[in-house]
Image (cartoon, coloured by chain):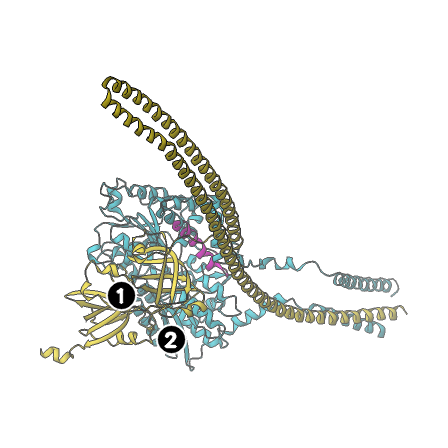
Amino acid sequence: MKNGKKTAAMAMLLCLAMLLCGCHGGDGQGELMESADIEKKVYYSLDEARQYEVVFWAKNDTNKVQTAQYRQAIADFEALYPNIHVEMRLYTDYGEIFKDVKNNISTGTTPNVCITYPDHIATYLTGQDIVAPLDDLMTNELYGLGGSKLKFDGPTREEIVPQFLEECVIGGRHYALPYMRSTEACYVNKTYVEKLGFTLPDQLTWDFVWEVSDAAMQKAEDGTFLVNGKDVMIPCIYKSTDNMMIQMLRQLNAPYSEADGSVLIFNDQTRSILYTVAEQVQLGAFSTFKISSYPGNFLNAGECIFAIDSTAGATWMGTDAPNMDIHNNQVAQFETVVLPVPQFDWNSPRMISQGPSVCVFNREDPQEVLASWLFAQFLLTDSVQIGYSQTEGYLPVTLKAQRTEEYQDYLARRGEDNNEHYYVKIDAAKLLMAHTADTFVTPVFDGSTSLRQAAGQLIEEVAKGVRRSKASGKTLTVDEAYLDTVFRKVSDDNRLDEIQRTGDTENADEEMGPLPGTAVALLCALGGVWLLIGAYALARVIRWKKHP
Amino acid sequence: MKKNALTIVLAVLAIAAIVFAVTTNSSNQNLRNEKTALESQLDKAVKDGEAAVTAAQEEAAAALDSAKEAAAAELAAAKEEAAAELAAAKEAAAAELAAAKDEAEATINELKAQLEEAVKPAAEAVENVVETVEDAVEAAPEAVEEAVEGAAETAAEVVENVTDTVKETAEAAQEAAENAAETVEGAVEETADAVAEVAENAADAVEGAVEEVTDAVAEVAVMSHEEYVAAALDTEVKVETYVQAKQSWWDNKATIYAQSPDGAYFIYNMGISQEDYEKLVPGTKIIVTGYKAEWSGEVEIVDATYEIVEGDTFIAEPADMTALLGTDELIAHQNEKVAFKGVTVEAYDEKGAAFAYKNEEEKSDDLYFKVSKDGVTYNFCVEFYLCGQDTDVYKAVEALNVGDVIDVEAFLYWYEGANPHTTAITVVTPAAPAAEAAAE
């Protein structure tokens, strides 16, 4: 009996020893627990007896109405949460926000809430715990989306446009909420299209754009262009050449990049796009914002037929545009039509989704993060969404706001005036509403901003090269060798070779490799011992039964 | 016994498991520590690597500079040598040519003397014949006629002989001249071959030196402002000018306002290190190579490279362009340092403000204001990257009132029309206070 107890005691000791072996978890599990702890910290409850200061960095389009919208949003929020004071800092350039945030990371003086782009967030995330992951905040019953303790009528998760919310996912987590969305549109001088003998379709193709553009290059004997009687005509001008390259590649189902940071842009379809660009620049039928100026300036002066720019720039387009940079006496009279960007194949249209998102920066104090989250969430309320979207051709990011009577009334009053209801602006917003399912975003990773810049630079380099050769009386030979040099230059200028590919975390276990031999041996030994113990116990039972 | 044995085995196994657990835990701790250490080492290695890369880059840049210098020196030396050899060869050829000429001249003179000698007796003979003829004519007409005929025949023979002699002499002289010419030609040819060989060697040396260092530099010559204005857009230009002012440096680029006595330039986003940027104080002479471009009416040099030139400096005085406001002539002074005097501040917007901020909240961006002259209003601005919020001109604009009469100094920038980048404002006549204006 005593020996039996000893045996049992030893067996239990062995079990305990085995448990000790199992306690040393891998580094991966430890990290997950750390992040989960951070998320769990923030949402217990908001201490309303405390005062909070939330620093908010935002960007406006040098538009006073937008500034007023932000101010109103802050005032309305502070009225609901008197203990949370929002300090706003306004920028006129996203690049400046990006630069300042990066500079402030090292000193721990980032803002609490920031209007930003996912590309930028990917760079912020290279630092540890800089940007707060929002998934648990979003699903929190009290303070999350549609939470019971919110003092405002915010949208639930289902009431946010799914595509726009999905765009804020980086590495499997939400690190931002969408704030405003836009896409690109082609603002067309329909009058000149018809003057050239064409019928403007509802669905533009690249072939049509080039055909009309080439036709517009015909000149009279005095050297002026037939279509407008002027010395200047650039039929197609593209504002954002990085969008141009990215969209064309997507439309052609051609590679651009992968989420792991792979740079795939230097391919045959890119070359074919650049050959077309070279051809059209040689004819004088195509130019870019960086080379010539704002497409809207040329469109409004009757010197451009297809001006491709953001829907958020709609108030600058057209004969009656409320915003204009050219003198009144230079404005031409024509009918402006807003169409989706040209496609290669309308059976599978693709257009970029763009527009600002809002992120929350981490702090040691979870209460501060919670207060910041509440303000960020407030920016998705109907009044803010509708008010801000009306300042330009933006679309509210919540279905909730889009479906309100107020917003529907705004859309219905299209063309009533040339300011709040300017028809070009409303048509631009409607365009995105109709094509939300056709929009896409590109993978976001540390370096995706550089890759985007490189995409645009490819077009700019070829266009400049052709123009400069033409000006010297030569014709640039755009061939494979030339494009190879352009690829090399663009890659070097943007340091694309320094973009690090990240491993696939889902397969991290496979990368761990096989168990060491000693571990295998011990496990086998342990298993073997238990088998022996079991066999011995069984033998004893059998013996006892035979000889009770 | 068996039970004791089993107990012992279990005890041993338990101890082994405990030891294993402890060992692996400590191994894991060691691994973590190692990982941390390795990460630190990696960071250090990355930093060292970056430092090494930077050092290597600097070394390579220095090596490139010294290779450039060496190649330039070699090139200069090769050029000098070639020039010297060419000069020597030319001199030698000239000397030989002169010698050949002298020889030919001497030969010709000799032949001339010979000719004279040959002609002299013939002339004398002709004279004698004429005298005899004359005497004979006096004595007997028939005989005279016969004698005259005979004398004429004799004279003709003499002349023919003399002519033959002269011809032979001329042919001999020509032959001598031809020989001399051939000699000279041969000398020249030999000299030319020698010169060509020297030049070829020099050219090979030069070509080799250039190929070893870098790609060829644009061969655009420095142009005057007039030539720059006449140059077509998108062509390569090269100008020698002087820095007048500069916008903020960022990401190895800066925009420069430059002017020479004959005209001004706007050099947009020129690639420049921060170290060199600091050297570009007003008045600094630079040679800029780039491409001429036009953006919304503003003519500028883009994709520019530069060379700082030690030596003279130049700072332009603002030229009074008040009379050209609203005229087609104003654009000819684009980018120059200009002044507009006695212009009146107008309301910028419907609210009647004297100016507007591009970023009203932060006051950290451009300022816009309008002025009028003779009933026509013009847009001016303060470019923040040129004159920030701490500058006198920025504060002066913030203090403007509608109705102020001011003098303005600016760089004549262009954006869809004149859009001067203001650098100084003087209020000449403040606007009348509101009460006085109402009373009036």
Please identify the residue farthest to the front as the structure is shown: B139
Q: Residue at x 45, y 44 (%)?
A: B99
Marks 1 and 2, how far apart at CA: 37 Å
Is residue A444 depicted above or below B363 in this figure? above
Helix, strand or loop: magenta stretch: helix
Q: Write down the residue under mark 2.
A: A86
Is residue A184 depicted above or below B409 in this figure? above
> Which shade of the palette goes to chain A?
cyan
> In the rendered image, which quarter is residue A208 located in?
top left
For residue B210, side relative to residue B20 (left or right): left
Numbered disc 2: secondary structure: strand
Chain ID, mark 1: B
The answer to whether residue A457 is magenta is yes
Range shown magenta: A443-464
> In the rendered image, which quarter is residue B145 located in?
top left
Q: Which residue is drawn at 71% across and 71% down?
A: B25
The answer to whether residue B309 is magenta is no
Where's the C terminus of chain B, which quadrant? bottom left
Is residue B112 depicted above or below A503 in this figure? above
Please identify the residue farthest to the left as the structure is shown: B440
Q: Quick one: B352 or A144, which is closer to the camera?
A: B352
> Which shade of the palette goes to chain B?
yellow
Q: Residue B279: horizontal and vertical position, in percent?
A: 42, 69
Q: Residue B91: horizontal and vertical position, in percent?
A: 46, 49
Is residue B361 depicted above or below B201 in this figure? below
Q: Quick one: A34 or B199, which is closer to the camera?
A: B199
For residue A508, side relative to residue A379 (left or right): right
Q: Write down the residue under mark 1.
A: B420
